[in-house]
Image (cartoon, rainbow, N blue to C red):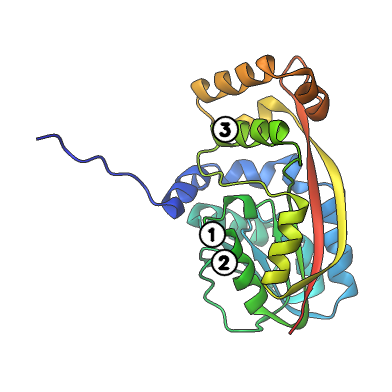
Amino acid sequence: MQGTVSTPTHDELVDAQFGHQAHRYVRSSVHASGADLQRIGRIASDVQIDAALDLGCGGGHVTYALSPHATRVVACDLSQGMLDAVAKEAVRRGLRNVEIEMASAERLPFGDGTFDLVVSRYSAHHWRDWEAGLREAARVVSAGGRLVFVDVMAPSSAALDTHLQSIELLRDPSHVRDRGLAEWTSALGRAGLEPISIEPFRLPLEFASWVERMSTPEVGCAAIRWLQRSASADVHRAFEINDAGDFVVDAILIEARSQR
């Protein structure tokens, strides 16, 4: 009789993918900088904040940006390795108002209306149940509170979308889906959230550091490069793919508020 193969749940897969890479995400220049991160800081400075939530905190760069503007910032992630790295970096930076909490976006251990501001940056495409995560974000934000979502945006073209989702999955098996603008606005409405600002931008990605952050095995890297080389001229133009495999994706920052 053949033995059964143990396969991880999605949450376990996310933890396995990111836990050992935590230090790389803390150091990542892509995650530690950017006009979108500066915009999040400006939003936080304009809103009266007692408590803020960094949902799917990763390396904690949103947490560090929110800390000067809030009494309390909770960094929440599925990966204990990520949370440990964030806690260590917060101490190194002298940020005394940072707390950590391990949880999935779909099952947040916070009461209704706990946070004045909820921010999720480059996390939502990993959520097993994206709409459940949005409903939870809507639940834990205060009445009339603000939310900010930043993520890679799926192209409207089927061919471009297929290319993007394929290379994302080859790089990181915990990838679920990048969403398009229409998907975002519809889902936010169903969650009881009203978009008040939508800011698209282009995000350049260097291939070598992009796969290094995730420790993508050589077979995955080779498959991504094969897809890039085999892609049509339309795909090459849209993603600005160069000879080294570097490319550019569309991303979006959505500021929303609770309709409660």
Residue assigned mark 2: 132
**Does 4 sit above or below residue 238?**
below
Q: Which mark is residue 129?
A: 1
Looking at the rendered image, the disc whose residue lies closer to the viewer, 2 or 3, is 2
**Does 57 sit above or below residue 115?**
above
Tell me the amino acid under the disc marked 1. Asp
Disc 1 secondary structure class: loop
Q: Is residue 45 left or right of residue 162?
A: right
Tell me the amino acid under the disc marked 3. Arg
- For this orientation, the residue located farthest to the front is 158
Residue 71 found in image quarter:
bottom right
Give x and y (percent) for residue 60.
Answer: 67, 56
**Does 177 sit above or below residue 124?**
above
Question: Is residue 119 visible from the viewing direction of this image?
Answer: no
Residue assigned mark 3: 171
Disc 3 secondary structure class: helix
Q: Is residue 171 left or right of residue 210?
A: left
**Does 55 sit above or below residue 193?**
above
Alpha carbon distance from label 2 to label 3: 25 Å
| Label 1 with label 3: CB-CB less than 8 Å | no
Q: Which mark is residue 84?
A: none
Q: Is residue 195 left or right of residue 92?
A: right
Name the foreground residue: 212 vs 112.
112
